[in-house]
């Protein structure tokens, strides 16, 4: 082989370096490579609605997640702290994959869904949650997610009240929200703070631990 010719095609890089120094394998994510500070940093800089919202700042996924956790507690005040934590983390995978709008997710199909679920599982395991939340909890979080989307749609994204009702349904009775999109640094700090409050209430540790492998 002549000098300079490549002996084989290198495999494409499938990991991302985080600001914490962790390298997260996107195809086989390890809980050991996930840090809440990386998640919060990323989500605070990911815009809902692809950034097509009014205001000086985008409405971040971090701030959206804080609202969804609040709505979950409004609907079910007696819910366990661990499921409130799951609500806060419901979009945590988007710190890696971004916030794709629902129509695009549908177009991508099951490959995207499987990729997202692997990340969600690793995140849950990292922070002490069951790998999969019970179906009733997932349904509750989805209800809260849609309620938050209703307020976002009407206040930030230009939807009429009727359009938002058609796509997202009515928000839960007795809950109202006035949205003020936060600067990224504030959204990030509030997300981390809320994580630690809920993690402590649930009796979980956020310190890295060794995970058994089969």
Image (cartoon, helix red, strand yellow):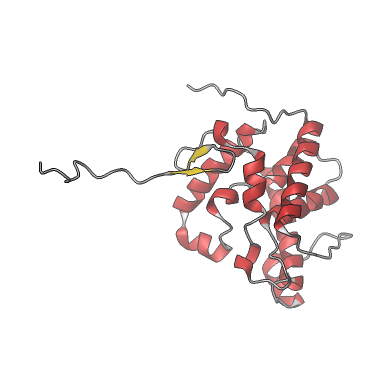
Identify the residue at image location x=67%, y=56%: 61
On screen, residue 166 above or below 122 = below
Give x and y (percent) for residue 64: 72, 56
Give x and y (percent) for residue 184: 70, 56
Q: Is residue 9 left or right of residue 14?
A: left
Identify the residue at image location x=86%, y=45%: 77
Residue 169: quarter of image: bottom right
Residue 170: quarter of image: bottom right
Give x and y (percent) for residue 106: 51, 61
Q: Is residue 30 left or right of residue 207?
A: left
Check the image and name the residue furthest to the right: 174
The mark total stands at 0
For the N terminus, the image quarter is: top left
On screen, residue 152 above or below 212 = below
The reply to whether residue 169 is visible in this rendering is no
- Of residue 190 and residue 121, the one placed in the foreground of this image is 190
On screen, residue 172 above or below 141 = below
Give x and y (percent) for residue 3: 14, 43
């Amino acid at each position: 082989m002549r000098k300079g010719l490549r002996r084989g095609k290198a495999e494409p890089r499938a990991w991302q370096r985080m600001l914490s120094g962790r390298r997260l394998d996107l195809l086989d994510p390890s809980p050991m490579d996930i840090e809440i500070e990386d998640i919060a940093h990323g989500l605070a800089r990911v815009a809902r609605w692809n950034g097509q919202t009014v205001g000086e700042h985008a409405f971040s996924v971090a701030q959206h997640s804080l609202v969804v956790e609040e709505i979950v507690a409004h609907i079910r005040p007696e819910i366990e702290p661990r499921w409130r934590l799951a609500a806060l983390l419901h979009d945590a995978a988007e710190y890696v994959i971004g916030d794709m709008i629902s129509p695009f997710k549908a177009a991508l199909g099951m490959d995207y869904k499987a990729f997202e679920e692997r990340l969600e599982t690793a995140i849950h395991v990292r922070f002490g949650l069951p790998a999969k939340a019970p179906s009733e909890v997932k349904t509750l979080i989805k209800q809260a997610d849609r309620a938050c989307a209703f307020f976002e749609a009407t206040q930030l994204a230009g939807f009429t009240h009727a359009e938002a009702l058609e796509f997202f349904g009515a928000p839960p009775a007795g809950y109202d929200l006035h949205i003020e999109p936060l600067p990224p640094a504030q959204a990030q700090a509030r997300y981390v703070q809320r994580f630690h409050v809920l993690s402590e209430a649930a009796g979980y540790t956020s310190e890295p631990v060794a995970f058994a492998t089969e």
